[in-house]
Image (spheres, rainbow, N blue to C red):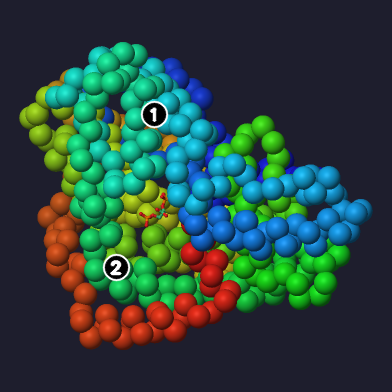
Amino acid sequence: SVDPEFEHHLCTKTPYRVIQNPDVSEVRYKGCTPKKLWYVIRHGTRTPGEDVASLMRSRLFDIRDLIVKNKNCTRYSDFAAWKPHIELDGKKRLTREGESEMTFLAQRLRKRFPKILSKTWNNSTFSFRFTHTSRTEASAHFFSRGLFDDGVADVWYPQPLKKDPILRFYKLCQKWRVEIKKNPQSLIELEAFLRSDLFSTVVTNITERFNLPDGELSVADVHLIYTTCCFETAWDKTELSPWCSVLSRQEFEILEYAEDLEYYWTDGYGYELTTQMGCVMLNDVFNFFRSKSESEASFYFTHSGAILKFLSHLGLYQDSVKLRHDNLNIQRLWKTSLIDAFASNIAFVLFDCSGIDQVLTLHQEKPVILPGCPANQDLCPLSVIERIYEKSRVQCDFEEMCHASEKKSVYDSVVSTMWLAYDSLKLLYFR
Ligand SMILES: O=C(O)[C@@H](COP(=O)(O)O)OP(=O)(O)O
């Protein structure tokens, strides 16, 4: 039987319905009027890239065949009937579920902030921006459907930039790309965790549970099973993927931790530069709030990496100790299943409270308190936020922080190439 809680352990492939906030009551604070809304959103549920899709079409079929050889296995008929999903095109395309996530998210937002959002589309009041990918573009379109009853067809979207300095700032940071993203050092904790007894036990347990030949399953196979469970759950809420029934609650938690470790060290608190870079996004918020333009709402459609780095820059979900292979804590704050699901979103809403600018910060549609803001209230004065993030405002020299030293780049690219030869690390490219 499948643990009904499993949907809460699907990391960055968690469908938004699992964590959404159904409360759509108008957000009001006494004596305050909402003036501006800045919103960054990860695209909705997508299909996997070709790397995962091709494994689902080939290796997963072999595993499926081995499983159904053992006719007594649980859910035999589901495995026997399983075939790669219709959504499997390898193009990281927005799925039906992703379309609904966007439309419903916008509808809920509009109900909460009718003063800003109950207006027909108007180019100077609302702005939209998405990255150079079909999934963020489609997300913007479906989101605007939920926001405007009419006039959706008129919504104007700027041409996406191949390398957007705000939406995907990290792609422009050579130092981060070389020294963190492509540096094997960043994966050391994950590597060690994959080699740990805890992880090996998961591989052995599944092998025994399904009566598979000894040594048949690799770490990468187990990860493929988990990834398939995640994607199939995300894009189909009506049917339970048989691959989810392969794993126990504890095994989900172990696989979840492996992914969280990876994201922690490449997109999160692992290295200072990763958290520092997010200043460009925060400065965009400040500029928007301080600008005298008529623009009242700004919507950005981006990716997982942007959400995680921005959360880390803000200082949210930071555990007191760094995540390592040997300190799995199920109470940790850094859980991508909660903080970086599909359609994850961060909003800043500026209120005028009797002449004082106050800011409401929302993550996944719920208020969050920025570290340093008053703990007992949702609103935080803009001047306090500007003080907390003073360094982000005055020392955000992207060129300077992202400049990679050439000697190191050459060294790292050689090491990275060698590193990619490791079979177990194939799973790192499962996107
Ligand atoms: O584009 C992808 O494959 C991943 C990573 O993108 P970056 O974090 O590298 O932008 O993000 P996703 O689209 O799933 O949100």
Q: Is residue 13 above or below residue 32?
A: below
- Residue drawn where x is 31% and y is 68% of the image: 177
Q: Residue placed at 83% from the left, 45% from the top?
A: 77
SS at circle 1: helix
Residue lying at the far left of the rendered structure = 292
Q: CA distance from mark 2 to mark 1?
A: 32 Å
Quarter residue 25 falls in: top left
Question: What residue does disc 2 label?
Answer: 176
Q: Is residue 285 visible?
A: no
* Left or right, 357 with reference to 148: left
Q: Marks 2 and 1: which is nearer the front?
A: 1
Residue density around tag 2, few if under 14, some if 14–19, many if 20 or more, within 10 Å: many
N-terminal-most mark, 2 or 1: 1
Quick one: 192 or 100, which is closer to the camera?
A: 100
232 or 365: nearer the viewer: 232
For disc 1, the marked residue is 142
Q: Nearer the viewer, residue 283 or 144?
A: 144
Lateral position of residue 398 relative to residue 314, left or right: left
192 to 139, vertically: above or below: below
Tell me the quarter of the image containing the N terminus.
Answer: top right
Q: Is residue 32 above or below residue 297?
A: above
Residue 20: horizontal and vertical position, in percent? 50, 32
Amino acid type of the residue tagged 2 in the rendering: Trp
Name the residue at 37% across, 54% down: 305
Q: Amino acid at mark 1?
A: Phe
- Taking the spot 49% from the left edge, 64% from the top edge, the residue there is 429
Judging from the image, what secondary structure is the residue with disc 2 in? helix
Answer yes or no: is residue 73 visible: yes
Residue 385 placement (x, y as % from top left): 23, 43
